[in-house]
Structure formats: structure tokens, C-alpha cells
Image (cartoon, grey):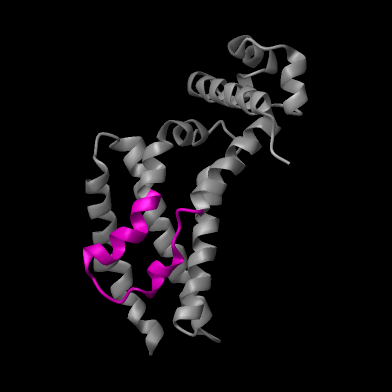
Amino acid sequence: MAEDLRVIKTKENIESHFIELLNRYPFQEITVKMLIAECKINRSTFYRNYEDKYQLLEEITEKLLRKYKKTIYPDIMKIKSDKVEDFEKFLLPMVNYFYENESVLLALNKDTVPAVIFDRMYRIMSEMFLEEITLSYNIRGEKATVASYFSNVIASNLLTTMRWWHLEHPELPKDKIMEILVKCITKGVYSSMHELEK
């Protein structure tokens, strides 16, 4: 059953103000009292929607992770070329996701926030990639360890690039990030994955 529009609007209000508070204060210092004052809602309205600030944080994180998962295309593991355009179609949705959600991801990426969103993103991506590598290369036995290595390295490279973009060079345009990602994959990890075919 779909949520009532008023409930959706209330949750959006609470979530957006919570993110604003995370950008100004450490997570531990944010209280429900602060949040309801920012949102201009009653205490009962907050507790009707969330058990506490930890549940609020988890719901925001889960919503972001569901969207993120839809941007990962494990079929990228099947590409056996170094043509930029072959990779761009698979990477563009992820780059767009990070571009569109920059402020929320930065707020959740702070040391004081217990959500550890990038760690969870890494696990999701590396698991999806490992499954695809295993199928694409018909992996069995000892090669499973090597396949696991490649899925972890590729996921790590992609997400490290996204973090670097947000934290150190947010001024870079999306097309420059795409260029960096494709070069990193095609000139590095992908060329060494041919070992899996032996």
C-alpha cells in the first residue's frame, strides 16, 4: 500500500533537515529536539515516523543504497575491449548518481556518522561484480580467489574515484570523471583480468 502524500512530504522534510544538521554538527550532537525545531514539526510527528535518529539515518542510507544498486551494471565485467564508449554506457548511471546525490553522500561520509555508506556501497558493488565475473569467465576452484580479488579491486577503484571527486575535486565535470574511470579500468585492471581466461 502506497504511503500517504502527507507522510511522504513530512519524511522528506525531516530527512532534508537532518542532512542539513549533519553538515553543521557531528551526528552525536544532533538531537530530536534540534531536528524538530529545524523542521518546525511536533515531537509526536517525528516519533510517528521514526523510532529515533538512528532509524532515520538508516532509512536515508537504505534509500540511497537502493538507488545506488540500480546504477550498477555488472555486465561491464563482460567487456573485452578498451573502447571508451563500451564502458561509458555502464558507468554513466553511476557517475550521474554520485553527481546528483553529492550533498547527501558527503553528509553521510563524515567520520562521526555511523552509517558507513561507502563501505556498504563497496560490498554491494564487489558482490555484484564477483557474481558476474564468476558467470562470464566460468570460474571454478582456485580461480575463485582471483575473481574475488578483481571484483574487489574494480569496486574499490570506482568508489575511490567517486570519493576523491566529491571530497577533493568537486569542480571537475562529469565527463572528466568518466574519462578517469575508463582509463583506470581499461589501462589497469581489465588488461590483467585476461588471466582468468587461462
Left or right of 107 in this view: 5 = right
Q: Residue at x 63, y 24 (%)?
A: 28
| 91 part of magenta stretch | yes
Span colored in magenta:
70-94
Vertical comparison of 111 with 74: above or below? above
Q: Residue at x 40, y 71 (%)?
A: 77
Q: Residue at x 63, y 33 (%)?
A: 57
- Which quadrant of the view contains residue 38? top right
> Which one is in front, 122 or 40?
40
- Which quadrant of the view contains residue 183? bottom left
> Which one is in front, 192 or 87?
87
Percent of width and height locating residue 51 = 76, 29
Percent of width and height locating residue 188 = 28, 67
- Which quadrant of the view contains residue 13? top right
Left or right of 198 in this view: 42 = right
> Which one is in front, 123 or 95?
95
Q: Residue at x 31, y 36 (%)?
A: 168
Vertical comparison of 117 with 43: above or below? below
